[in-house]
Image (cartoon, grey):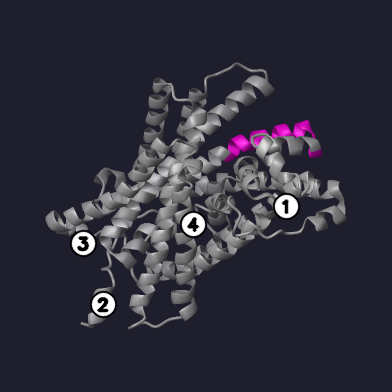
């Protein structure tokens, strides 16, 4: 036997009856990624916050982040062809840093995505409650009933075959994109070509105190492109589909939001945009759309914002369910979570479990009297940090994996060394910024910062400790960790 084979994790073969199945193409897979960032929610909610921190430099920040994440995608795509298991970052970290780190990363992912997704029910409940009562003149139904309703809807969709979710997400995303394109065109048209050209792309200064927060919020808009590898068993021609969808999603998201930021700047003016975003953060988009296109179109945009949140929640639930499924299939979680629906070929038990967790949390916080406006920034911010930390760990794992392989399988220096090194440095810097600005990320106090940051690192370290326990007491389970199918 060649001794170098010891450097590569062992292959595990999955029973075909217990494998997920689907038929998504490049477009549908890319739309799943776009749905995660929720375009309308981002343009209406996150982008004004970013403008508040960055002003007229927002488009340049988006383009810079896009270039960095495209570089990250080089190693990511290369890794997806070498490590062909459907475990996403879980598989990648295991292959590069070992099974203990892989299991720690998987716990970060599972809990991080569940936390990020929990922003949706409370945000949806508040938004729909206001729309029904104020705009439509309907009954004032408590937010938690809407929150429980959307949880039930997404759980039913996640229970079914992934192709159903993919088709729904594609339709919703196309409608959302259309609304934002109308806003962009209306803004540029209203201000004339000369005004638009004069806006330009101002470069941020590294001495700007708010640059770190702006970068942090911009990077968060790209989360979800890990889905391209998580759905490996549910797409057509995985190698081609995953690589094309990854690059399309990253480049498309970056350019899309850069143009939207440019449209805000053209409408409000380069000198005024930061002040306007700070004084009118919540209503910046709706007021701009009303002024440019009219009240009826603005109401349509609100309706699509509501469906956008549903699409975002469904996308996140699908990813979280597949992490739960992967861990259960490797017997790191109870085996019943690893069941595959006979007809839908979906991780139906895990999908239902995620829905139950969200529903239980809604009921618990309602009984405790916690306001939904408090819930969604904490849920989104703490989950975002967990996934960001995982992305940094994954970038390090990709670098280590390919450096180890170079002794017996030399490959492109750009793909296996240079691009991964740049990714480690970039994501390391963003992770540091997230730690330094954690209170702003979750919109909470110093106490909440300590609690949630400690919990996040404890997830990773706890996963490592659990893996070491399995290695010592249940080596047969430890041997199967990582969802590995190595090329």
Which sits earlier in the primary sequence, circle 4 or circle 3? Answer: 4
Give SS at disc 3. loop
State the residue position of label 2. Answer: 5
* Magenta-tinted stretch: 292-308
Residue in the image at 50% along x and 69% along y: 74
Q: Residues within 10 Å of mark 4 (few under 14, many from 20)?
A: many
Give SS at disc 1. helix
Gap in angstroms between the C-alphas marked 2 and 1:
51 Å
State the residue position of label 4. Answer: 430
Callout 3–callout 2 Cβ contact below 8 Å: no
Q: Position of residue 149 (x, y in %)?
A: 49, 28
Gap in angstroms between the C-alphas marked 3 and 2:
16 Å
Q: Nearer the viewer, mark 1 or mark 3?
A: 1
Which sits earlier in the primary sequence, circle 3 or circle 2? Answer: 2
Q: Nearer the viewer, mark 2 or mark 1?
A: 1
Q: Which mark is residue 364?
A: none
Gap in angstroms between the C-alphas marked 4 and 2:
35 Å
* Residue at the left extreme of this rendering: 473
Which sits earlier in the primary sequence, circle 1 or circle 3? Answer: 1
392 in relation to 188, above or below: below
Q: Is residue 42 magenta?
A: no
Q: Residues within 10 Å of mark 1 (few under 14, many from 20)?
A: many
The image quarter in which residue 296 lies: top right
Which sits earlier in the primary sequence, circle 4 or circle 1? Answer: 1
Q: Nearer the viewer, residue 168 or 406?
A: 406
Q: Position of residue 236 (x, y in %)?
A: 49, 62
Q: Which mark is residue 479?
A: 3
Q: Position of residue 213 (x, y in %)?
A: 55, 49
State the residue position of label 1. Answer: 262
Q: Residues within 10 Å of mark 3 (few under 14, many from 20)?
A: some
443 in relation to 110, above or below: above
């Amino acid at each position: 036997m060649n001794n170098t084979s010891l450097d590569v994790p062992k292959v595990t073969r999955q029973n075909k009856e217990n494998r997920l199945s689907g038929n998504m193409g490049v477009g549908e897979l890319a739309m799943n990624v776009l749905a995660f960032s929720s375009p309308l929610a981002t343009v209406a909610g996150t982008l004004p916050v970013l403008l508040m921190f960055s002003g007229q430099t927002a488009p340049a920040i988006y383009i810079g982040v896009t270039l960095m994440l495209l570089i990250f995608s080089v190693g990511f795509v290369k890794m997806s062809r070498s490590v062909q298991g459907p475990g996403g970052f879980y598989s990648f970290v295991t292959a590069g840093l070992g099974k203990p780190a892989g299991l720690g990363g998987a716990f970060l992912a599972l809990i991080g995505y569940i936390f990020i997704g929990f922003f949706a029910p409370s945000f949806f409940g508040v938004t729909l409650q206001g729309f029904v009562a104020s705009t439509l003149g309907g009954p004032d139904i408590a937010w938690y009933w809407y929150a429980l309703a959307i949880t039930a809807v997404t759980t039913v969709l996640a229970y079914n075959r992934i192709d159903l979710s993919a088709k729904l997400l594609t339709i919703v995303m196309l409608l959302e994109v259309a609304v934002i394109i109308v806003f962009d065109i209306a803004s540029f048209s209203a201000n004339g070509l000369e005004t638009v050209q004069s806006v330009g792309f101002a470069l941020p200064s590294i001495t700007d105190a708010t640059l770190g927060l702006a970068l942090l919020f911009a990077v968060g808009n790209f989360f979800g492109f890990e889905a391209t590898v998580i759905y490996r068993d549910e797409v057509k021609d995985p190698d081609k589909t995953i690589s094309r969808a990854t690059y399309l999603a990253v480049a498309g998201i970056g350019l899309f939001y850069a143009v939207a930021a440019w449209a805000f700047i053209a409408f409000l003016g380069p000198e005024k945009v930061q002040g306007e975003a700070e004084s009118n953060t919540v209503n910046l988009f709706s007021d701009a759309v009303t002024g440019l296109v009219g009240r009826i179109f603005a109401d349509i945009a609100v309706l699509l914002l509501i469906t956008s949140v549903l699409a975002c929640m469904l996308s996140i639930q699908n990813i979280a369910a597949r992490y739960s499924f992967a861990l259960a299939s490797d017997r790191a979680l109870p085996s019943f979570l690893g069941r595959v629906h006979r007809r839908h070929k979906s991780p139906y038990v895990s999908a239902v479990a995620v829905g139950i967790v969200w529903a239980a949390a809604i009921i618990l916080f309602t009984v405790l009297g916690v306001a939904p406006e408090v819930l969604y920034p904490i849920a989104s911010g703490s989950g975002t940090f967990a996934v960001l930390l995982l992305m940094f760990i994954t970038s390090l794992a990709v670098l280590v994996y390919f450096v180890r392989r170079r002794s017996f399988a030399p490959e492109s220096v750009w793909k296996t060394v240079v691009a991964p090194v740049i990714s480690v440095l970039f994501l390391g810097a963003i992770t540091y910024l997230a730690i330094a600005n954690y209170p702003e990320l979750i919109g909470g106090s110093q106490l909440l910062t300590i609690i949630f940051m400690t919990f996040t690192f404890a997830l990773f370290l706890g996963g490592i400790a659990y893996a070491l326990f399995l290695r010592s007491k249940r080596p047969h389970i430890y041997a199967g960790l990582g969802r590995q199918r190595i090329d």
